[in-house]
Every structure is written in C-alpha cells, then in structure tokens.
Image: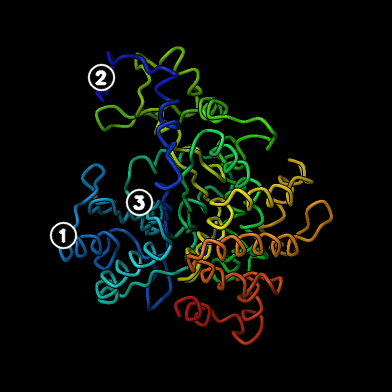
Amino acid sequence: MSSLKTQERLEYQDILNIYTSGCKEKSLHTIGLEYERLPISMVTGKAIDYSSEFGVCNFLRAFAKSENWDYITDDYNIIGLKQEHDTITLEPGCQMELSVKPEKSISDLEKKINSLDKLMEPILDKMGITLLGYGVSPISTHKNINLLPKRRYALMAKYLWGILSDVMMRETAGIQACFDFVNEEDAVRKFKITNKLTPFVTAMFANSPIRGGVDTGYKSFRALSWLNTDNDRCGFTYRLGDEYSFEEYIDYVLETPVIFITREDLPIYINGKITFKDFMKRGWEGFEPTLDDYLLQANLCFPEVRLRNFIEIRNHDCGKKATPYSILALYKGILQSKSSMDEVEELLNPYSYNDFAELRYNVPKSGLAAKIAGVSVKEIVKEILYISEKSLIGENSGDERYLDFIKEFALQGITPADVIIRNWNGIWNKDIKKLLKYLSD
C-alpha cells in the first residue's frame, strides 16, 4: 500500500476486515508463541548491550551467517532476523524474542524453540551470553541499558508517561500466547474469558522479585512496571461487561492517542496530540490515514489481551524453559473446549470489573496470596488448573503433561517468585550469582 499523501482515505470497513479475516473453522486452529528472554553476560550477569564486540548485534550477524537467516533492519541497523515464518527480534533493551510459525500442537512449538536454541547456543557460548528465563533484569537497570537503535523505540520512550515505562521497555521479558477463533462470537467470548483470567495467571507465573540486585518486595516487578507505563493503552480494554464486539475493540484503538505514523519508512511524530479517530476524521498535516497506520496504532496499544485476527494474551513473566509450554497448555485446555469455557465463566462470574481491576493491582506484590472480593486467589487458581487439565486429558493429546511445571507451584499455593524469595533470604544469602545459577539451570 502506498504511503503517499494522495492515498485513498482509510475506511472503517477496512479496519473491521482485519478482525473478521481471522475467523476460521476449528480444524484449522493453531497456537502461537512469542518468547522473550534477557541476554546477560555469563561472567557479570549484567545486560548485554547492542553494539559492543560481544553485543547482540554481532550475535545476530554471526547467527545469520551460520544459519542463512535474513536481516531485519531499521535505518540500516540490524534489529532482528527472519527465516520464512520464524523471527528472532530485539525488544527495546535488547531482550531477545523468538516468534515461530503457529502450530497445531504445543509439542511442535516446543521442538521448534528447542531446535532454535540448539542452533544459537554455540554462538551465544562463544560470545559469553546467556539467555535468561526471568521477568526482569536481575542486575542492570534501565539507567544502564541503552535503548536499541530502532526509531520507533526512541519515539515510544519519549512519549510513554508512566513512572516505570523505562523499566518495562528496557528491563522486562515476557511470554505471549496466541489462539484462533471461529467467528466473532467465539472471539469475543475467548477475549472476555482471557481478560478475566489474566490477573490469576499473572499471579501463577510471577517470576521477577529480584531487580537491580535487591529484593523489590514484589513477586512480579514486570507486572508492576506495566501498571505504571501508560494507562491509555495498557490494562483492560473495556469493563468486562456482557456486551462486546469487534467494533468495540476497534473503538478502543481509535480512541487511543497516536504516538507516530510512518511515511516512506520515516516516522512522523504526533506525540498524542490527536486520537486515531481524529486522524480518520481530519487527517494530520496533510496526511490521510492508511491501513498500515491503523495496524501500527493497534500494535502500540498494550492491553493484557490484544485482539488481532487472533487472540494475543500478553501478561506473563518469562520463566524457566518449561514456562511457555505450561502457559500454552493452561489456556489451550480452557479455550479449545466449550464446556471448559462454561466452567471458567461460572467460576469467575461472581466477580465485578472493580474486583478484577483491584486484583490486577494487588497481584504484582502478593502473587497467589492475593484475594478477590475476600476469596483466596490460590484456591481459584486450583480450580482453573483442574478445569484445564480435565479438558486436556479428555482430548487425549498428552498436553496435560505441560501443566506439571506450574502445578508443582500452584498446588502448594506458591509462585516461582516465592521460591526465589525464600532462597534469596535463606541459603543464597542474597548472593546474586546463586540466583543467576538457579535461573540458568
């Protein structure tokens, strides 16, 4: 699509088509994964930078040469690699994200990630880099982590107004799970269920208590950083009511301030002076909105669950190698079974929007010790796990085995962060090297 000022004006139907294009029969449904990790020095534990001799850019160069991957560039800077449907990309603080082609089975995704890890391992080892499965940088803070030289990140860093937005951008690593839908009704139902599940699953997988070499007092400092990034574009997209639709999600995106647009591959900074709805009505300094502008705008909204031509669930701390597949299994057991969705809705229907919103703010500090309307989160989580596991067993795929990782924690009423905190204040004696060894094992 041309980016010239004279381009035909974007119509609402063009936007709606993005979401309806995702409707597909159940037999074609796949599962997607985006898996971020923290590149740190094997020697110091500090964050690896972009441009040094043993930095992330030279890793990308070496991997591309070794495995014949193509560069992804921005203003001549290498910001990632691609090969067919698979990508290795960099987040603002050089966090490394693997995104592979969606698959029908979790085991196929696991095989693909393991294969990529094996290909990357000798190059990472040679450069003294470890990819850490953890939710926040354990030693280096944002003040010591340079921003990746990608133009959009500089504009985002300048615009995002939350007091922890720099932490979110430069220090954190998360896991995103993606699921398909049959039609709009199915999409909205899954969207509503996953929004309600997010604070519970954030609590289950909390894994970022130690930051900057100290105990933060939070079980998920990553989740805390998202609470303090930009309320216009983070959190829930609606009040979790009974009525919702593609159009209402689109309206949420349209009502969000525009950070920037691009023309001829160059950013044009708008700095939140108009919403996208205003842009569609009046344009901006002679520019008319394009479909690419809307796609960019939608990608610069960061709700807990993002609606695209699939459902993207975004609220999980990175963790040890079993973590991403445990997350996928938990949601698969619920979202791919009508009876499981019925049970989860019945379990969570007693709670109001305010209950979920309050829980979202309590979970980063308390994890599974939090309560919702006086009810223990740890007990609700056990019910959620039971519903998912029962569904996975019933489909006879064997995917229930992926729940074993999180069950080991949740059935005791603890999170991965609780184990770290206990050891940090106990046998590790606040020794950061012991934390790093634990996270690397």
Quarter of the picture containing the N terminus is top left
Q: Is residue 206 above or below residue 187?
A: below
Q: CA distance from mark 1 to mark 3?
A: 23 Å
Q: Inspect the image, locate mark 3, and give the three-letter code of the amino acid beneath it.
A: Leu
Q: Note whether 117 is above or below 50 in the view shown.
A: below
Residue 223 vertical position relative to residue 405 in the rendered view, above or below: above
Q: Is residue 218 left or right of residue 258?
A: right
Report, in whole angstroms, how far the alpha carbon at label 2 lies from the one at label 1.
34 Å
Disc 2 + disc 3, Cβ < 8 Å: no
Picture layout, residue 11 above or below residue 158: above
Residue under label 3: 148
Say how the picture is coloured: rainbow
- Which of the two labelled residues, at mark 1 and mark 3, occupies the earlier sequence position? 1
The residue positioned 51% from the left and 52% from the top of the image is 168
Dot 2 or dot 1: first in sequence order is 2
Could you say where residue 203 lies in the image, as x and y percent from the top left? Answer: 65, 60
SS for callout 1: loop
* Image location of residue 303, percent across then percent down: 55, 42
- Element assignment for label 3: loop
Query: Depth check: 284 or 345 in front?
Result: 345
For the residues bearing labels 2 and 1, Cβ distance under 8 angstroms? no
**Camera-side mark, 2 or 1:** 1
**Separation of disc 2 and disc 3 at Cα?**
28 Å
Residue 4's tag is: 2
Q: Which one is closest to the eye, mark 2 or mark 3?
A: 2
